[in-house]
Amino acid sequence: MVFWSVSANAETSGLERALNALKKSGTKVSAQIVNLTNTREWLKVDADTPLNPASSIKLFVAYTALKRLGINFQFKTQFFKNEDQSFCIKGDGDPSFVMEDLYLVVEGLKRKGLEKYSGKIWVDASAFDDEQYPEDRSDQDSERAYNAPLSGLNFNYNTITAFAFPTQVGKPARVGLDFPFSFVQIHNKVMTAGTTDVTWDKKGVGSQEIVSLGGKIAESAEDWKKPFRLRDPATGFAEAFSKMLAQGGVAASGKTEWGKKACSGNPYFTYSSKPLSFVVQLMDKYSNNFIADSLVKKLDQVVNKRSGTTEGGIAFIRDEMQKVGINLSTKGRKYVSGSGLTSANLAAASDFIALLKVIDREKVLLPEIFASLPVAGLDGTLKRKYIGSDVQERLRGKTGTLSGVQSLVGVYPNQAGEWIAVAILVNGGTGIPEKELAGYLSGHE
């Protein structure tokens, strides 16, 4: 159903009127729209005013990481087999390593002839420093998945997901975890009922993590699920590895246990991640904070040849942006977080338009970055946006959302085959006027 059918002439100035109306209400706005093909500016509303862009700031990470590390860069997780038949796993900061990858690791080890090991597993997360949460990250105590800790050795985005499944009305629901870690307990008080209203709580008690579920789940529901952060990613990796080995038929000759130390010698097996272009797509499509902040540390590790730090990675990105004419440290700008999960970042719409111009001019990274952006009404964070409008399945944009903050930075292909660059930042108020934006873009065909 098309419900945003408007005349081009009415909407040509409708967006600007809507943005100015927001300004009059006390909302802060920074917006700019430019035709990248002929460089003609279409719209400009306080385009040089720095505001909090939330997750749209991830585009600076995407561009710098792809340019410095390379489109086909791969993280290398190394597995060392020691003389005492124990294993040592050295992480490379791979933020995309998930359960399926661990299965492939075990299969690879079996193909090399591995049949048993001592049961001891060491982990080495020294690729990054020990700071799990960037200093400027908001709400660092949150147990939600968006606040996953950073580590040099990662598993399942350093999250764990709790599930609840209905049984019969009046009876307890079945609950479980996506991976049975011994240090995660799940307490179940969920009852099967006619409607769903599941409550949850998660906390750490010593070395244990406790997930408490309550409320009710509808008998007709398929399931209920909630992802949480995993407090000790490296330990989680070690336990997951031990259980995957056992599941694959690789026996432990002694007690299964794990600890932390530096790996040494030559790796017995090396597992390569998917290309960086794929990792960046995961980051941008779903606005993954964990991936963004991990790439910041990876840049510092590679460039400065040390355990990666947030501070070092951010400084490198600032320097790279300066080289292409984007200064994130002057005129009210401030860049401290790669993910945008902070109240401290400040950038203007003109900074993002400048970056899109660079990407378009250089061409080399354009396919990867444009493909990484969510598509309106189709996928990622824009899956439920602009449905029924003329820009559905055409507008691509990196979204940003925090309390009182909404942003969109992206591109729109018009009927003439030209890329139109869009950057709109709104702090306060009701957010971006999406109906007017859709009409404005389609009205310029």
Image: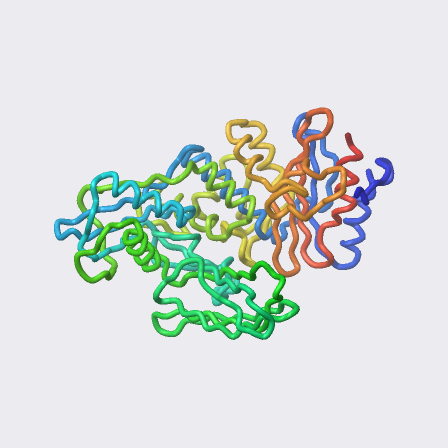
Number of numbered discs? 0
Q: Is residue 412 above or below residue 308?
A: above
Q: Nearer the viewer, residue 267 or 327?
A: 267
Dividing the picture into quarters, in which one does residue 118 lie? bottom left
Q: Residue 304 location, x and y as percent?
A: 34, 43
Residue displayed at 70% across by 38% down: 33
Residue displayed at 27% across by 44% down: 78
Q: Residue 9 location, x and y as percent?
A: 86, 36
Q: Nearer the viewer, residue 370 or 39?
A: 370
Q: Is residue 96 above or below residue 27?
A: above
Left or right of 95? Residue 77 is left
Residue displayed at 42% across by 52% down: 156
Q: Residue 358 location, x and y as percent?
A: 56, 32
Q: Nearer the viewer, residue 223 or 410?
A: 223
Dividing the picture into quarters, in which one does residue 3 lie? top right
Q: Residue 401 location, x and y as percent?
A: 62, 54
Left or right of 324? Residue 245 is left
Location of the N terminus by quadrant is top right
Name the residue at the left extreme: 83
Location of the C terminus by quadrant is top right
Q: Can residue 5 be seen by looking at this rendering? A: yes
Residue displayed at 55% across by 48% down: 286
